[in-house]
């Protein structure tokens, strides 16, 4: 029963059920690690170590990456965050002296298993780098390129896929009238969104973003951050950034790496308001360790 | 709490200035409470007037601390213990300002209130209870400020616990005044004045408790307010 008359005199206060409003959460709160269910986990890393020759870059990393969430990896230069990111689509395989031990399971599949086709893996795990790297081709061809590699596809379907990817990368309105122009004529921010469109056109499960906005101006950066927020409804996103505020803004979970160790990994809320480890605290508050 | 210096020395010095402003505001507010009670006990109208005239300065401190904190948050984007310290200070400055208001209220009873006669024999036992309440509330205030300055979470927990005694002494004073009014109706104005003063002291205890709770939040990151009443 609701009370329409706010005049105290006329209210009957017996047996009146008043709907008491409860405060809503202004900030989206991601479930804490202890609340994760098995089906929430997209990537499971167990005891992962990696060395370049004799130099250890990652030491016994174990972590779970939650599906359709944004996970940020932060830490000082050389801490291993990019190396870790590159493990997820086996980009480190391209370096001769690398030795890797431990396991990485993507939706239950061990990605180092001999049966795994690396090209296939990289289709499922797309990657975007710091500097936008469009192909010297038209805007359309940049997005269509990866889709064509997956096999023959009718032109109309390809057109639809290109439009879908450009829309999802928040670029369609800006380029719809010049799809046949060279991608190299676009601004840096547009190029980066084009590269993201190219990555999602082949509909991967996971997107790896390695400093995706560090070469961009603040407005382009905001657009990329907004895009990341929208893309997580469909993709599991891992982002490496040296911009801590960016990690705080875009991610649900944050891992702090230092000297190849995963020092702390928790919800972004906890990491930025009340981290457990002194090293994390010193790093995010800008102190000497 | 983190006592390592920041890489940015400028940030450290900004935080330092802010903390000394906070400490100065705390000292001013303590003096206001002390003087207001002194004025009440001695019926010292001049002292009451000077408390009232200094109230403006307390308000200026609050505004200054709010502005500086806002600027630091906007420009430095603090995180973790720095963020909690700033939030704790921002909220505590509001409590300090309200303690200043209570001191002003006590002074106002002297300058604008109805006449009251503290020398009446019938009032003496109650006035000694008021003195006890003043000691307890002042001590809570002093301790909460020390807890803040020393980032002393354990001390803050004790300060919070002291509020229970403040409340119980306050209730006893109100009860005594109720009886006094029934027995000595001629002194009703005096009893009312005492109730107002006791009420202000009790509120000062509440605000000191809030400050101590903010210390726990700043140091440990845990919100311990409304324990026992929260539904979660």
Image (cartoon, rainbow, N blue to C red):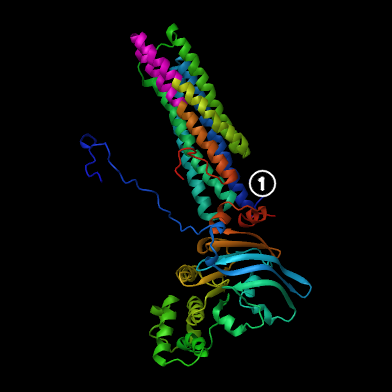
**Residue hosting label 1:** B3
Residue lying at 52% horizontally and 86% vertically, measured from the top left = A146
The residue lying toward the viewer, choosing from A103 and A210, is A103
Q: Which residues lie in the magenta part?
A: B172-201
Residue lying at 47% horizontally and 14% vertically, measured from the top left = B127
Q: Position of residue B190 (x, y in %)?
A: 38, 14
The chain to which mark 1 is attached is: B
Specify the farthest residue to the left.
A10
Residue A259: which quarter of the image? bottom right
Q: Is residue A161 above or below residue A31?
A: below
The residue lying toward the viewer, choosing from B183 and A223, is B183
Is residue B193 highlighted in magenta?
Answer: yes
- As helix, strand or loop, the secondary structure at mark 1 comes to loop
**Crowd class of label 1 (few under 14; some 14 to 19; many from 20; radius 10 Å):** few
Q: Position of residue B195 (x, y in %)?
A: 40, 20
Q: Is residue A58 above or below residue B127?
A: below
Tell me if residue A272 can be seen: yes
Q: Count the marks.
A: 1
The residue lying toward the viewer, choosing from A195 and A44, is A44
Q: Main secondary structure of the magenta part?
A: helix
Residue lying at 47% horizontally and 10% vertically, measured from the top left = B124
Look at the image and tell me in which quarter the N terminus of chain B lies.
top right
Specify the farthest residue to the right.
A54
Q: Is residue B89 above or below residue B11?
A: above
Please state if A189 lies on the left or on the right of A3 as rendered. right
Specify the farthest residue to the top.
B121
Residue A105: which quarter of the image? bottom right
Q: Position of residue A148 (x, y in %)?
A: 49, 90
Q: Position of residue A267 (x, y in %)?
A: 55, 58
Residue lying at 63% horizontally and 53% vertically, measured from the top left = A281
Is residue B175 highlighted in magenta?
Answer: yes
């Amino acid at each position: 029963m609701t009370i329409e008359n706010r005049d105290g005199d006329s209210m009957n206060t017996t047996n009146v059920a008043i709907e008491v409003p409860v405060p809503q959460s202004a900030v989206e709160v991601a479930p804490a690690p202890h609340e994760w269910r098995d089906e929430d986990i997209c990537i499971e890393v167990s005891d992962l170590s990696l060395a370049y020759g004799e130099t250890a870059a990652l030491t016994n990393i174990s972590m779970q990456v939650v599906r359709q969430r944004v996970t940020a990896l932060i830490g000082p230069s050389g801490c291993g965050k990019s190396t870790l990111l590159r493990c997820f689509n086996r980009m480190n395989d391209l370096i001769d002296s690398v030795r890797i031990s431990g396991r990485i399971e993507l939706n239950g599949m061990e990605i180092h298993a001999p049966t795994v086709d690396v090209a296939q893996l990289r289709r499922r795990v797309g990657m975007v780098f710091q500097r936008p790297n469009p192909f010297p081709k038209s805007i359309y061809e940049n997005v269509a390129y990866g889709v064509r590699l997956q096999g023959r596809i009718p032109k109309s379907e390809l057109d639809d896929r290109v439009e879908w990817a450009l829309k999802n990368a928040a670029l369609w309105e800006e380029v719809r009238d010049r799809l046949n122009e060279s991608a190299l004529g676009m601004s840096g921010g547009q190029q980066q969104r084009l590269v993201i469109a190219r990555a999602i056109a082949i509909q991967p499960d996971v997107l790896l973003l390695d400093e995706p906005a560090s070469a961009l101006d603040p407005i382009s950066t905001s657009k990329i951050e907004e895009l990341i927020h929208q893309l997580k409804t469909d993709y599991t996103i891992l982002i490496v950034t040296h911009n801590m505020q960016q990690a705080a803004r875009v991610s649900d979970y944050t891992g702090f790496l230092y000297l190849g160790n995963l020092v702390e990994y928790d919800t972004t809320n906890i990491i930025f308001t009340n981290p457990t480890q002194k090293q994390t605290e010193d790093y995010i508050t800008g102190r000497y360790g | 709490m983190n006592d390592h210096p920041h890489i940015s020395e400028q940030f450290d010095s900004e935080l330092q200035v802010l903390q000394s402003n906070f400490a100065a505001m705390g000292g001013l507010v303590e003096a206001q409470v002390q003087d207001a009670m002194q004025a009440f006990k001695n019926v010292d109208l001049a002292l009451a007037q000077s408390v009232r005239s200094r109230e403006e300065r307390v308000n200026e401190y609050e505004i200054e601390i709010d502005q500086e904190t806002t600027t630091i948050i906007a420009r430095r984007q603090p995180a973790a213990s720095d963020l909690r310290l700033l939030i704790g200070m921002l909220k505590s400055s509001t409590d300090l300002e309200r303690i200043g208001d209570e001191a002003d209220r006590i002074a106002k009873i002297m300058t604008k209130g109805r006449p009251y006669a503290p020398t009446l024999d019938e009032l003496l036992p109650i006035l000694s209870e008021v003195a006890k309440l003043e000691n307890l509330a002042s001590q809570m205030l002093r301790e909460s400020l020390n807890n803040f300055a020393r980032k002393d979470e354990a001390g803050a927990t004790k300060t919070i616990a002291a509020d229970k005694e403040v409340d119980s002494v306050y209730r006893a004073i109100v009860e005594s005044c109720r009886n006094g009014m029934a027995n000595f109706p001629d002194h009703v104005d005096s009893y009312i004045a005492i109730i107002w003063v006791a009420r202000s002291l009790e509120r000062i205890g509440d605000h000191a408790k809030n400050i101590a709770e903010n210390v726990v939040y700043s140091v440990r990151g845990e919100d311990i307010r409304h324990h026992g009443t929260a539904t979660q």
